[in-house]
Image (cartoon, rainbow, N blue to C red):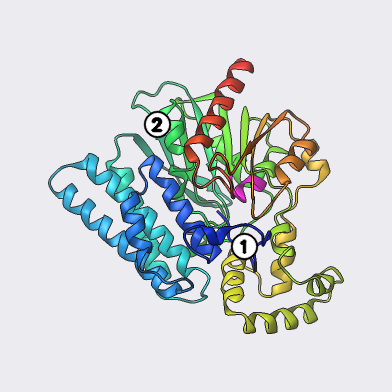
Amino acid sequence: MSAIPFRPAHPHQAFSAGFYPDIDFDFVVRCVLGATASGAADVGEVLWAIDAVSPGDHDEWFRSWHSAGERARALAETTAAVDHEFSASWAYLRAATYFAAAVNALSGFGPDDRLLPTFRKHRACWDRFVDTTAHSVDRIGFPYEGDELPGYFFSPGPDPVPRPTFVMVNGSDGALSALWSSGAAGALARGYNVVMFDGPGQQSMLFERETAFRPDWEAVLTPVLDHLLRRPDVDPGRVALYGISQGGYWIARALAYEHRFAAAIADPGVVDVAASWSANIPKSLMKLFHAGQRKQFDTELGIGLKLTPKAAHTWNFRARPYQRDSYYDTLTAVHEHTLTAADAARITTPLFLTDPEDEQFWPGQSRRLADMSGGPALVSRFTATEGANYHCQPLARTLTDQRMFDWLDDTLARTGH
């Protein structure tokens, strides 16, 4: 999921009525608490982690989540040592969630010798969950431009019968383990295979291989789909695609050129990634950017970020996956993540688009994508009254699962697959 570049896109939103007056801290807490519904966190562990952290204390924020990860990991290892793998599996998953929050706390501070070790602790706990879960799991290296994207293929059962398959695309900074709570657990419970992987610029591909984001995700998803369609346990007519947060853009772009997916879910729909940046950059600077004044833009933005360390932290966090050398070039790369009207018209795949009230980053873009798409599209509104507001409905993932999988089951049935 995403964070806000400089300030809330909608300052009237009552984030201060939540867990923290700091909107970034508050949103992380909402996301981690939302993971409790699928067993990826525990309420008491989360409340313990945040209890002693003062608002705005980023170092303590990191240390607290890191400590929560260590506690859960120690519990998992103690339990695994006496052959209680079922219990150990869930403790490893919770540890992965908390270490992921610790990684998130570090990743905007520039060079930090804690980042890679913490990420590797997170990934080691995720892999131990994979090793001990009751589900059947294959590790897969999906082909990508002479390299491989590290991925996982979960199956609800060991028998290799053709099943519907749910391919998950993460957001700009989401941990792979977070996809468990964003639909993987719900898909497995409903009899779907689940596929997840790190794409270019995401987590392991960024931290360990320094790859950058790219806007043309058909170059990523077509090889993934080619690989899956060779498996006997994948029903070729029932492969569905899901994208969360910025993944909502990436899947939409891919669907303009890759038409073999039977259905797709964007949570939420995104057509203009740069909107969440430009809305939070002073208009005077955006005029310089649009006028092509690269040097002046870089100079003035650099001065502004020196005066506002929190904004600099957020810029570093958001900019790192684009792998550009200047502020101007970074923002140019962000603007490349825009779905044109011509590309949207090429989409024929049925779409389900979440549309939460109080969307912080891309308000109104699910409706825009539905209107632009060349195929059928359903926009599903989520509201504060349902406890389902804010980006990706962090505290309403059970409700989200219900709506999107009911739609997906019905869509696959209607299309005759």
Q: Which residues are magenta?
A: 244-250
151 and 121: which one is in front? 121
Q: Residue furthest left?
A: 82
Q: In the rendering, at what x and y percent does residue 80 appear?
A: 18, 47
Q: Earlier in the sequence, mark 1 or mark 2?
A: 1
Mark 1–mark 2 Cα distance, whole angstroms, equals 35 Å
In the image, what residue occupies the spot 74% across and 52% down?
A: 272
Find residue 4 and name its label.
Answer: 1
142 and 406: which one is in front? 406
In the image, what residue occupies the spot 62% across and 62% down?
A: 4
Q: Which residue is mark 2?
A: 155
Task: Give amino acid for label 1.
Answer: Ile
Residue 315 visible somewhere in the drawing: yes
Q: In the rendering, at what x and y percent does residue 66 appear?
A: 34, 65
Q: In the rendering, at what x and y percent does residue 383 appear?
A: 61, 41
In the image, what residue occupies the spot 12% across and 46% down?
A: 82
Task: Give amino acid for label 2.
Answer: Ser
Query: Closer to the observer: label 1 or label 2?
Result: 1
Residue 175 visible somewhere in the drawing: no
